[in-house]
Amino acid sequence: MARRRIAAIAGAVRVLLSILLVLLFVPGYAAMPPAPRLPASGRMTVRPVTLDAHDPARRRVGRLTFLGGVALASDAPAFGGFSSMRVAGDRFTLLSDGGTFITFRMDARWRIDRLRFGNLPDGPGTGWEKVDRDSESMAADPVTGRLWVGFEKYNAIWRYAPGLAAAEARARPQAMTHWPGNGGPESLVRLRDGHFVVLSETGRWPHEKGRAALWLTRDPTIDPSTGFRFSYRPPRGYDPSDAAELPDGDLLVLNRRFALPYDFTAILTIVPRAAIAPGRTVEGVPAARFAAPLIHDNFDALAVTREGADTIVWIASDDNQSMLQRSLLLKFRLDPAPGRAPSPGTSGGDAG
């Protein structure tokens, strides 16, 4: 009997030690609830917004003409946080910085149809914590529908099947290894010729003042080493938050700034493609600035499409899932620079 009791006590001690070892060595997420995910289906409300609440008739901001906009909202706990998007015709994909996304169709009267909520099927880390799915940027191949997603923290790029249905490939480019964990691949663009551009939000190359940037000549999940480094210098006090290719091949860059007590402003700049070269630091020409009294928020997502001869610019905001912010989706027409004729461009592209 005593031997059995000793064995039972020893067994209990082993169990207790095992529990203690788990608590000591298993990452902290074991004691944390999992990051919220979007349900398979849900509801979303759409409310019209104006460019200037004090002057609802106002339509112009820099080289942009305001064509309309809406504030998106839902009761789903994981809704919002949109950091990148794809627009293809009337089909929209908005990806959050937590690995959740929504897709829908929207007509010319801002009516939503075929709304779907989703979550990335795979990604860096375990997916237990939100930072494991810190998906900050997205690019698309308009022909195949494949999507590339840039992840901060891991400084990785993953490729997904159309509709973000499944992960296909992944890479952590050596050149991005030392980019800040919270300032990595904030902007990712697939150019029409198959090249890619990646902009770091806050990272810098050694001895350079601009933001670290990469020009990759191939799919980065297949060969992340072919291409060159360059730097992008944003407007003073701003960080790049997204980018897209314009019909003439130039790069449209969205830059944002946060200022206390709680205010976001944004500047759109245009970087000539011809200015981008190995080792060069490039700057953009300002095209529009968003600050009071104009509508402004944490503008974090950008897409460019064509409607006939018009270049359409879409901007979405990351509400940080905060009551103080909104998930905005805004539509503009990019007008020619003063003294310049409209560019013939290339129709049908969705660059970013």
Image (cartoon, rainbow, N blue to C red):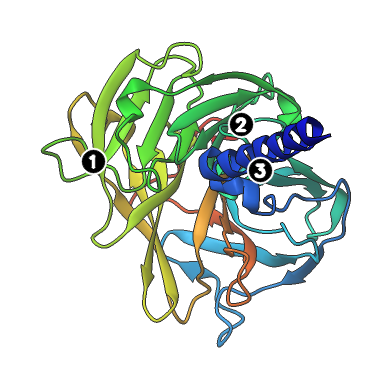
Residue type at numbered disc 1: Arg
**Residue 178 visible in the displayed image:** yes
Q: Quadrant of residue 316?
A: bottom right
Mark 3 — residue? Answer: 16
Q: Nearer the viewer, mark 2 or mark 1?
A: 2
Q: Which mark is residue 123?
A: 2
Mark 1 — residue? Answer: 204
Q: Position of residue 278 (x, y in %)?
A: 21, 23
Q: Is residue 340 above or below residue 61?
A: above
In this rendering, position of residue 131 left or right of residue 67: left
In this rendering, position of residue 202 left or right of residue 53: left
Mark 2 Cα within 10 Å, few/some/many (few <14, many 20+)? many
Q: Quadrant of residue 304?
A: top right
**Tag 2 near tag 3, CB within 8 Å:** no
Q: Position of residue 291 (x, y in %)?
A: 42, 74
Tell me what residue is drawn at x 27 percent, y 57 percent. 235
Tell me what residue is drawn at x 76 percent, y 71 percent. 47
Q: CA distance from mark 2 to mark 3?
A: 34 Å
Mark 1 Cα within 10 Å, few/some/many (few <14, many 20+)? many
Q: CA distance from mark 2 to mark 1?
A: 25 Å
Q: Is residue 231 above or below residue 219?
A: below
Q: Nearer the viewer, mark 1 or mark 3?
A: 3
